[in-house]
Amino acid sequence: MNRLSAMRIRLLDAAESAEQLDDAIGRVRTVAQQLVKPAPFRRLLSGTDLGHPMHPVLVQLPIGLWTSAWVLDLMGLGKTRAARSLVGLGVLSALPAVASGVSDWIDTDEAEARVGLVHATANSTALACFSVSWFRRRGGQHSGVFWSTLGATFATAGGFLGGHLAYSLGVGVDTNAFETGPDEWTAVRGNLPTEELVARTVDGVRVMVATTEEGRFALADRCSHRGGPLSEGSLEEACVTCPWHGSQFELVTGVPTRGPASIPQSVYENRVVADKLELRRGENRALRRRAV
């Protein structure tokens, strides 16, 4: 392992294990929960209707605008109106990106919450630097280029941590992404469910089975948002509500009807044969196919 890789691993491990951040996380979370509390606002920030987390989509705007301004700076055009406009538009577009990131972060815990706080701090510092840059450029001061460069440095660090949150820690990733159910009718373990909500296991996958007046429905038991057990939730108007963060999913389609979840639940076909419940799920995604 080279020195750069070793340093990167040590820094990430330090951020994940920094328990001294937990008090600050609790205080910030309390304030943040109030800011994004209105259900329609949270639904928008989470990307529930988009079917995809909103934060990765929104961050592209400030990144692109600030990068374009940086290119003009390299060309010696940092004092132009175009460069100033790009920096200003980047600042404005960063605000909804920050709000969506906060919405995602408040449902994280432990290592994910700690790295998320450092990620947010780096990006907030970048936002402050670019804001100063805009004011400096407006006054015709060359120091605006310096503040943009400093902001880009913090934004790069924040982006690296954001990548770690998504690709290494799985924040924003469908928690059912690598679980596969049987593609042939397979009997579940246990008796035929008669309870309103119950968990069953089929082919090594935990499935929530809901029994209602309209029929019997089966969804992946792990909430796609943060992995909460849907079988311990509640039924309401043909939907199941996650007990952890309140996400709600249609029983028929698995589509989220209320955030913070944005990714649908896996839906299983079901039938009863000789008093045994059988399930199956057709799946075309290669990563869900077991190697063995």
Image (tube, rainbow, N blue to C red):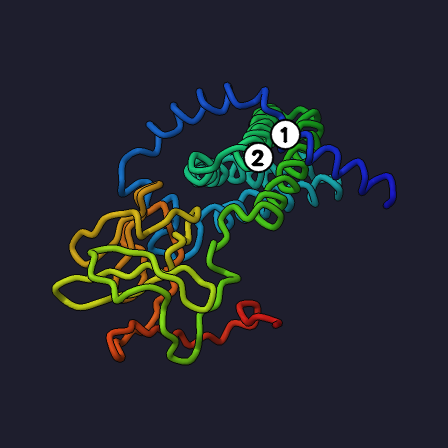
Q: Quadrant of residue 106?
A: top left
Whether 188 is drawn above or below 3: the answer is below
Whether 166 is drawn above or below 239: the answer is above
| Residue 70 visible (yes or no) | yes
Question: What residue is rendered at 28% in x and 73% in y?
Answer: 276
Question: What residue is rendered at 59% in x and 20% in y?
Answer: 20
| Tag shown at residue 17 | 1
The mark that comes first in sequence, 1 or 2, is 1
Residue that numbered label 2 is attached to: 111
Where does the image place residue 156, in percent across and percent down from the top left? Answer: 67, 39
Q: Are marks 1 and 2 in contact (CB under 8 Å)?
A: yes
Query: Could you tell me which quadrant the C terminus lies in?
Result: bottom right
Q: Which secondary structure, mark 1? A: loop
Query: Could you tell me which quadrant the N terminus lies in?
Result: top right
Where does the image place residue 94, in percent across and percent down from the top left? Answer: 50, 38
**Which is more toward the observer, 278 or 86?**
278
Where does the image place residue 253, in percent across and percent down from the top left? Answer: 29, 66
